[in-house]
Image (cartoon, rainbow, N blue to C red):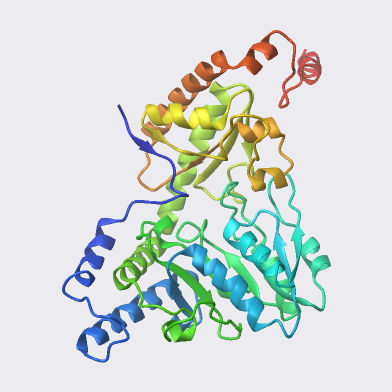
């Protein structure tokens, strides 16, 4: 049986060069960066090099603007809560897109219980945030704007520069979650107008257990955990030196290989989507079409009359690893807040699958995935009461209602 990994938005394998760079810091160079002896100095030097490598990936003004955390979730918490606490004398209002990652939305929900307020910006059917809606939401009390670079489920590339310019005009810090784009798309914090930006190295072939938060020196930020004075007092706790070293190497490789990675995954993305469309009726692409408005690594599809969880499990049995939304057992269960925000029909949201590509995937794998996907859908529809009802005319298709289909046929002839 073949094994095809198509869940790169969740994590990626550590590159051999990254692992090789990390290994000495588990054994020979094991010192803690806060120590004053030579072992501590070696560890501090390693952190300094990693900061420079990360800063180069995102065009930060200085390596000193890079804060290392335990992961992107902590980075988001620090950015949102740390900014809110630092600026609460200026106001208590936060503007955020409705499709942000839960690490951002739940951090804001936590702050709302403490008296902060929030305006959620709606998105269109493809997941785009309208900069003018952001402008309209800003008030004299606004202290932070949060919009992700690329949506983690839909692959939608947001108009970050326009939104950053709007926030900059008002002197409001702008936090960009770049977890879905870091290492896969050019990220330029200066051009974006980002005062804060988060990255997740294990999404671009680095290790787990380390996150990155870029903070412009003009952006005020309070620490949110108590302890030592590590990371310039912004994040207490001994730094994970091996993981940070690996993150730096992964960033350096990503910057060098980025054009090649984008071209490769974009070709696979188009090939797979065209094949799925041709093979499977009643299938829908969520988010923009492959091209300049969608990251090249992502396909988010909904298949009518089947459940996403069923597709995921049967694909896994055939060696294909992908991702699905929430468990799809009955219409009573919640669907992804991202798909809900786009207005996607509930039944289509339940039949959702996220396919995310990596640099190691091949064209031959895409052919295998398309063939297997078609068989899986046929098998599940053969077991589906909804498909049976549709075949007998009891219910209609959401994607292509019979009246519309009949009209389209008449127009062709």
Looking at the rendering, in which quadrant would you find the N terminus? top left
Left or right? Give the position of 292 relative to 72: right
Q: Position of residue 265 (x, y in %)?
A: 45, 45
Residue plotted at (70% across, 81% down): 88
> Is there any visible trace of residue 195 in the rendered image?
no
Which of the two residues, 121 or 370, is positioned nearer the viewer here?
A: 121
Q: Position of residue 391 (x, y in %)?
A: 67, 10
The image quadrant that residue 119 belongs to is bottom right
Which of the two residues, 402 or 202, is positioned nearer the viewer here?
A: 202
Q: Is 212 drawn above or below residue 262 in the view shown?
A: below
Residue plotted at (41% across, 47% down): 358
> Is there any visible trace of residue 145 in the rendered image?
yes
Q: Position of residue 116 (x, y in %)?
A: 73, 72
Residue plotted at (74% across, 84% down): 90
- Residue at the limit of the structure toward the bottom, as seen here: 36
Q: Is 225 drawn above or below residue 370 in the view shown?
A: below
Looking at the rendering, in which quadrant would you find the C terminus? top right
């Amino acid at each position: 049986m073949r094994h095809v990994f198509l869940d790169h938005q969740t994590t990626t394998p550590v590159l051999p060069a990254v692992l090789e760079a990390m290994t000495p810091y588990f054994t020979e160079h094991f010192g803690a960066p806060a120590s004053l002896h030579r072992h501590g100095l070696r560890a501090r030097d390693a952190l300094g090099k990693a900061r420079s490598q990360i800063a180069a990936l995102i065009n930060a003004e200085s390596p000193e603007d890079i804060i290392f955390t335990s992961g992107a979730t902590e980075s988001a918490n620090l950015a949102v809560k740390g900014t809110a606490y630092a600026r609460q004398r200026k106001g208590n209002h936060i503007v955020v897109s409705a499709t942000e990652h839960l690490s951002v939305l739940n951090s804001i929900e936590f702050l709302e219980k403490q008296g902060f307020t929030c305006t959620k910006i709606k998105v269109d059917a493809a997941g785009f945030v309208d900069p003018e809606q952001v402008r309209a939401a800003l008030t004299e009390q606004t202290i932070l704007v949060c919009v992700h670079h690329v949506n983690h489920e839909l692959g939608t590339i947001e108009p970050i520069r326009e939104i950053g310019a709007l926030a900059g005009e008002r002197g409001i810090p702008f936090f960009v979650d770049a977890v879905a784009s870091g290492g896969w798309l050019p990220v330029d914090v200066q051009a974006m107008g980002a005062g804060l930006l988060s990255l997740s190295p294990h999404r671009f072939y680095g290790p787990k257990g380390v996150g990155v938060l870029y903070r412009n020196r003009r952006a005020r930020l309070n620490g949110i955990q108590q302890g030592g004075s590590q990371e310039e007092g912004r994040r207490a706790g001994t730094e994970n030196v091996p993981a940070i070293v690996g993150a730096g190497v992964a960033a350096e490789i990503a910057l060098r290989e980025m054009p090649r990675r984008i071209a490769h995954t974009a070709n696979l993305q188009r090939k797979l989507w065209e094949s799925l469309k041709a093979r499977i009726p009643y299938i829908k692409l969520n988010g923009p079409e492959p091209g300049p408005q969608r990251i090249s690594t992502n396909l988010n599809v909904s298949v009518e009359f089947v459940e996403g969880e069923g597709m995921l499990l049967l694909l896994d049995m055939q060696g294909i690893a992908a991702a699905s939304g929430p468990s799809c057992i009955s219409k009573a269960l919640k669907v992804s807040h991202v798909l809900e925000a786009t207005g996607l029909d509930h039944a289509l949201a339940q039949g959702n699958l996220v396919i995310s590509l990596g640099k190691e995937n091949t064209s031959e794998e895409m052919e295998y995935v398309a063939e297997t996907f078609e068989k899986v859908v046929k098998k599940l529809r053969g077991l589906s009461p909804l498909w049976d009802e549709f075949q007998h005319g009891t219910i209609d298709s959401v994607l292509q209602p019979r009246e519309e289909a009949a009209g389209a046929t008449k127009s062709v002839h």
